Amino acid sequence: MNIMRNLIWLFVVLLVGTTALAQKPRPRKHKPMANQGICGTVLEKKGNHMPGPDKPMPKGQPVVREVVVYPVLTMEQVKATDEGFIIDVPGIKPVKTVKSDKQGKFCVYHLPPGTYSVMTREPKGLYGNLFDIDGRINPLIVKAGKVTNTTLEITYQAAF
């Protein structure tokens, strides 16, 4: 009878112990929230990029540059030089400014969903060489919970 009582007691202790362990919350491994913004590479192209037979097209060199993000802009909203560099954006401040690394890589996180103009800062002013059908300067769209990838090409010293 003593053996039976000890076995029942052992069974109860094991049952209560495993139930308590099962109910204990386990630490969760949190997945990092998907960042939202724009990431990319800044490449500089210089010299002759004219196509030719058996001539590989150079991809450009990664460069360190300041990358400036504005709410989407058109040329009517900015002051530019005859060479196309933007020297002033009256009344509109940049949303964010970051610097690309030696590999030309940059990321701008925590941007609200929307459309942005992304340019590089050059000695003569801001540089953005792409326009959409509505005349918006290098427009990039940020969607909720997504990172938009891009390549910014600095081509003002290249011939195509």
Image (cartoon, rainbow, N blue to C red):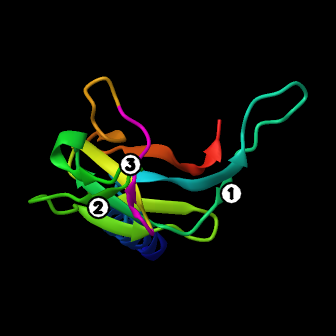
Q: Dot 1 lies on which element?
A: strand
Quick check: is 71 in the magenta stretch? no
> Which is in the foreground here, disc 1 or disc 3?
3
Q: Can residue 25 be seen in this view?
A: no
Q: Residue at x 88, y 24 (%)?
A: 53
How far apart are labels 1 and 3 at the CA level? Answer: 22 Å
Q: Which amino acid does label 3 sit on?
A: Gly
How many neighbours does mark 2 have within 10 angstroms: few (below 14), some (14-19), or many (20 or more)?
some
Q: What residue type is labelled 1?
A: Gln
Q: The C terminus lies in which quarter of the figure?
A: top right
How far apart are labels 2 and 3 at the CA level? Answer: 9 Å
Q: Residue at x 82, y 27 (%)?
A: 52
State whether the magenta stretch is mostly helix, strand or loop: loop
- Residue 159, image x and y in percent? 65, 41
* Mark positioned earlier in the residue sequence (2 or 1): 1
Q: Can residue 115 be seen in this view?
A: yes
Task: Check residue 84 in the rendering and tell me which mark sits there, or answer none.
Answer: 3
Residue that numbered label 2 is attached to: 87
Instruction: Give the residues drawn in magenta, as a range.
Output: 123-131
Residue that numbered label 1 is attached to: 61
